[in-house]
Image: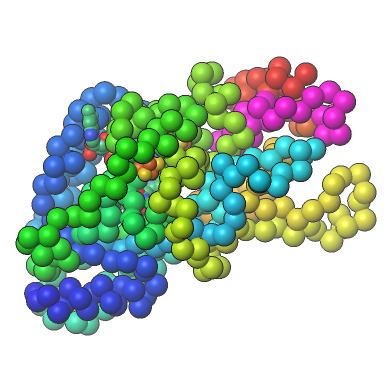
């Protein structure tokens, strides 16, 4: 295929709503050689799927693969950062932090729709027979590595892909294909340089010290792993450092200077979901009444959700990944860190919710609730 075809793909991806797009030849990239050691050190924890051999070699991921198309989609909404000292939190109400990427609709669906549309357009443009598979997270590939060599950015010390203009609050989606496409970077061009320099803000700010060295994470220590991927109890040593995080964590991105001037997105799918108060509650004066939101959700609200509420509210949201049990477990830990004390307005109501969970047959929930109770008495 020609250079013009690649330029057409990049332009077309942008017209479908991607902020950036790049094309790369499917090769053995140096970063992938470190994968066996990373896995052998146990850093993947319970994420057994990361050991799939296909992840270390695109040729195994898709037999006959020649190229990958990588799309980048910004999700940097306008709300303050989790590290913003001006964060206007009403301190009578304990709030949790849901990661920015999970405030709106599930990004897998949002990106997948755009990637599928791009594959359809490829089929119209290229009449030769070819295979093309679209993935968002779900494929046996390391998306950040493909993105780097497609010219979309550098791998930062926090292990994320960073782009000089967009920072790191963006999603990646890839199309693996047997089409032999011209890469975006010419033969003499290198991927964008590493602009982390002497900065180490992300490494120093991580509350659980998840980075064993710059560019290397022990995922078992990352709050994102603990709150989303881990199914059992949160290990004791991480509970206090978890603070008010109930789903994911943004700290190593919030402190990154490259995110300071990143463009803001207004697309409705990524704006925080708001749940208006039911009409019958308008006359109820016993609670502080307000709409509920996934941006700074009230912990008491989260803790009071039952499984049916959870299914209903988080349909089509990334939060459903941790399941009801995971979210309630995380809300217990966050409440244990909330500083709620006897005599405070919410103490009675929160204690009763925790008491009920402490009696649960589910040992993880019961133990998490007991831990929270022991910290707020
Ligand atoms: C597993 C996973 C996680 C895990 C592990 C994180 C990680 N850093 O790998 C957890 C659950 C912790 C996680 C968290 C998050 N994730 Co995530 N995650 C993934 C996923 C599905 C696979 C990544 C992977 O293969 N990791 C495995 C390890 C091996 O990769 P690695 O860190 O790059 O390891 C290499 C380096 O350590 C390197 N290396 C360099 N020097 C050295 C030296 C030594 C000695 C060794 C051993 C290795 C080594 O070699 C290793 C192997 O290549 C990708 C989607 C995909 N399919 O790619 C999304 C993805 C990376 N995640 C994403 C996001 C948004 C997040 C969060 C921001 C979500 C949140 N807010 O909570 C956080 C960010 C945390 C962080 N700082 O990375 C985005 C990132 C976008 C971007 N800008 O880069 C992706 C691309 C999803 C997407 N489709 O958009 N994630
Ligand atoms: S997401 Fe949070 S816990 Fe995970 S590495 Fe970054 S700062 Fe540390
Ligand atoms: S905080 Fe500093 S070291 Fe970390 S990723 Fe950003 S620029 Fe790189």
Q: Quadrant of ligand 1?
A: top left
Q: Does residue 234 show up magenta in the picture?
A: no
On the image, which quarter does residue 159 sit in? top left
Residue shown at 50% from the left, 65% from the top: 265
Q: Nearer the viewer, residue 329 or 181?
A: 181
Name which residue lies at 23% across and 74% down.
9
- The spot of residue 58 in percent (x, y) is 15, 50
Q: Residue drawn 32% across and 49% down?
A: 161
Decide: is 200 above or below 58: above
Question: Magenta residues: mostly which secondary structure?
Answer: helix
Check the image and tell me how it is coloured: rainbow
Give the magenta-colored segment's residue range: 324-349
Where is residue 16 drawn, in percent x and y? 37, 75
Which of these two is toward me, 177 or 34?
34
The answer to whether 22 appears left or right of 362 in the picture is left
Q: Quadrant of the N terminus?
A: bottom left
Residue 108 showing in the rendered view = no
**Left or right position of 113 against 93:** left
From the top left corner, tell me how far across and down residue 207 is, in percent: 50, 29
Which residue sits furthest front? 198
Position above or below: 247 against 210: below
Q: Residue 78, located in which quarter of the rendered image?
A: bottom right
């Amino acid at each position: 295929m020609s250079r013009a075809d690649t330029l057409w793909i990049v332009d077309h991806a942008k017209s479908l709503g991607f902020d950036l797009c790049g094309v790369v030849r499917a090769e053995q990239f140096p970063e992938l050689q470190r994968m066996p050691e990373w896995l052998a050190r146990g850093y993947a924890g319970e994420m057994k799927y990361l050991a799939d051999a296909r992840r270390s070699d695109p040729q195994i991921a898709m037999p006959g693969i020649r190229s990958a198309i990588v799309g980048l989609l910004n999700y940097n909404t306008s709300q303050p950062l989790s590290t913003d000292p001006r964060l206007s939190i009403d301190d009578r109400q304990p709030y949790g932090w849901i990661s920015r990427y999970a405030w709106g609709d599930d990004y897998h669906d949002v990106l997948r729709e755009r990637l599928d549309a791009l594959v359809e357009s490829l089929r119209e443009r290229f009449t030769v027979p070819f295979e093309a598979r679209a993935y968002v997270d779900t494929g046996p590939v390391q998306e950040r590595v493909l993105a780097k060599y497609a010219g979309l950015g550098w791998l930062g010390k926090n292990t994320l892909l960073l782009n000089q203009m967009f920072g790191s609050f963006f999603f990646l989606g890839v199309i693996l294909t047997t089409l032999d496409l011209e890469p975006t970077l010419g033969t003499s061009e290198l991927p964008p340089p590493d602009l982390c320099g002497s900065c180490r803000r992300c490494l120093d700010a991580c509350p659980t010290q998840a980075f064993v060295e710059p560019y290397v994470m022990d995922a078992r220590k990352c709050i994102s792993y603990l709150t989303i991927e881990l199914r059992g109890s949160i290990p004791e040593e991480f509970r206090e450092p978890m603070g008010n995080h109930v789903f994911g964590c943004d700290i190593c991105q919030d402190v990154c200077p490259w995110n300071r001037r990143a463009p803001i997105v207004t697309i409705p799918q990524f704006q925080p979901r708001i749940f208006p108060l039911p009409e019958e509650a308008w006359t109820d004066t016993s609670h502080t009444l307000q709409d509920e939101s996934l941006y700074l959700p009230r912990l008491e609200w989260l803790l009071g959700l039952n499984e049916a509420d959870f299914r209903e509210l988080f349909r089509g949201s990334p939060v459903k990944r941790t399941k009801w049990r995971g979210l309630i477990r995380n809300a217990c830990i966050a409440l244990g860190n909330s500083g709620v004390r006897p005599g405070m307005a919410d103490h009675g109501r929160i204690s009763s919710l925790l008491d009920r969970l402490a009696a649960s047959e589910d040992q993880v929930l019961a133990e998490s609730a007991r831990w929270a109770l022991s910290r707020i008495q």
